[in-house]
Amino acid sequence: MKKGDKIVGIILLIILVISLSAASVYKFSIKGSKNIAVIKRAGTVIKTIDLNKVVNPQEFTFKTDKGHYNTIAVKHNSISIKEADCPHKECVKSGWISQPGQMIVCLPLKLVISINGETNTGIDAGTF
Amino acid sequence: MNTKPVEKETYLMGTIVQLKVYGGNAEKATAKAVESISDIENKMSTNIETSEITKLNEKAGVSGQKLSEDTYFVIKEAVKYSKLTEGDFDTTIEPIVKLWGIGTDKERVPSKSEIREKLKLVNYKDIILDSKNSTVKLRRTSQAIDLGGIAKGYTADEIKKVLINNNIHSALINLGGNVYAVGKKTDGTNWNIGIQNPLNTRGKYLGAISVADKSVVTSGNYERYFIVDGKRYHHIFNPKDGYPSENGIISTTIVSDKSIDGDVLSTSTYVMGVTKGLKLIESIKGVEAIFITSDKKVYVTSGLKDSFNLTDKEFTNEKR
């Protein structure tokens, strides 16, 4: 083997290692950045939003069959229930949530917002 | 092995029920589990006019009510725990629960005389059990039973039974914060159950415990409450004075094999306070507890020392 071949081999190896590690770092960071809010009414998904991709604050209103409503506000990486016509406004009092595993529940109107994603906490379920 | 669980979310017993079930038969097992929940609710809810408990309460002071095997069992267990806690848990609390109406559109702070009147009706010693005829009678008119502090735990145990009978070895049952971790995770490791930080929003945990095949039940003052003139009134009543229990404890978590025990004991120890509560739990084999007080102290019983991990540095682990 010539000396030049060896150098070329080493350079190729270095390039390969760099590109592989760059790819895995990229993949990992994208995976880790996922922050999907899932909005369900009576157990059925009515909307999903990638909170990570929200740039400008927005609001959505969801009505029930009986005309009751929850108004949901989103901003970058966060979601909350801004307004609702349920009796105790527990859902509105919950404020903003932003991390995988967190949840807002409006029991009277059967609305649940949960954030799915790669939990780095390793928690499987919560007791409250 | 199928590692993607069947997830089912439903609303029963005035709360949100979440099931996460692993295994080949998960679909069928989950459907059966949901059926069993509504069956129990139809028998034991005070909000359902045709339930056995509603009928029993209507006949108070007059005659007894024949009950299904499971309703009789739950009342018998409630009486057992009322005795064990010397009335710090009392399933005849219903007149007080109804008077305050917390969580309903009638919630209010009653007058002292109203509370005094209703408190006279609260006494588990007036529950007359007739096991031969599977019949229960309340001694005096207007007395009433509320299974709020025990029925959810019983339901979790029943769901677990249904799942296991349907060949399920790994599942998470969550009845509005009452968790049953069935078996282990599919990778063979323990489940990690987060303990709610009572001073933060839902889903913010102050720590976690690692368990397999255990019930983890929490009672907290943040769960259901209302505020009048800046004072918070929560839904866990002291059966001895008729007011929401105030003794420094703001959350109790019980880890046990049976969820019915966890449900009753989390409510009981919430009312007992730290010293008496710890003493009771340490005296019961196979049951462990985590108590959190308003001054951000965390008390853990001896059996949980290795499996509980306190992560929120604002709280201090009390050495006992």
Image (cartoon, coloured by chain):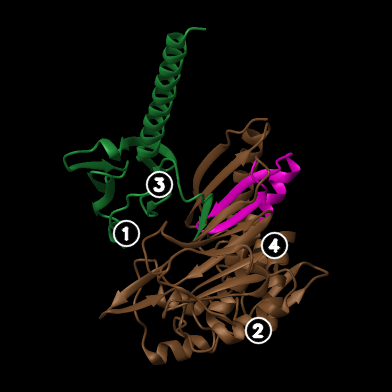
Chain colours: A green, B brown
Pinpoint the chain carrying mark 2: B
Neighbour tally class for label 2: few under 14, some 14-19, many 20 plus, Cα within 10 Å: few
The amino acid at mark 2 is Lys
Does the magenta-highlighted stretch encompass residue B180? Answer: yes
> In the rendered view, would you say A87 is above or below B120?
above
Residue A118 in view (yes/no): yes
Marks 2 and 1 belong to one chain: no
The amino acid at mark 3 is Pro
Left of A106 or right of it: where is A80? Answer: left
Query: Which of pointers 4 and 3 indicates the residue nearer the eye?
Result: 3
Residue B206 picture location, percent across and down: 46, 64
- Residue under the point 69% across and 54% down: B213
Disc 4 target residue: B258
Q: CA distance from mark 4 to mark 2?
A: 20 Å
Q: CA distance from mark 3 to mark 2?
A: 37 Å
Front residue (pair A60, B13): A60
Neighbour tally class for label 1: few under 14, some 14-19, many 20 plus, Cα within 10 Å: some
Q: Which mark is residue A100?
A: 3
Q: Is mark 4 in CB contact (under 8 Å) with mark 2?
A: no
The amino acid at mark 4 is Lys
Residue B64 in view (yes/no): no
Front residue (pair B190, B271): B190
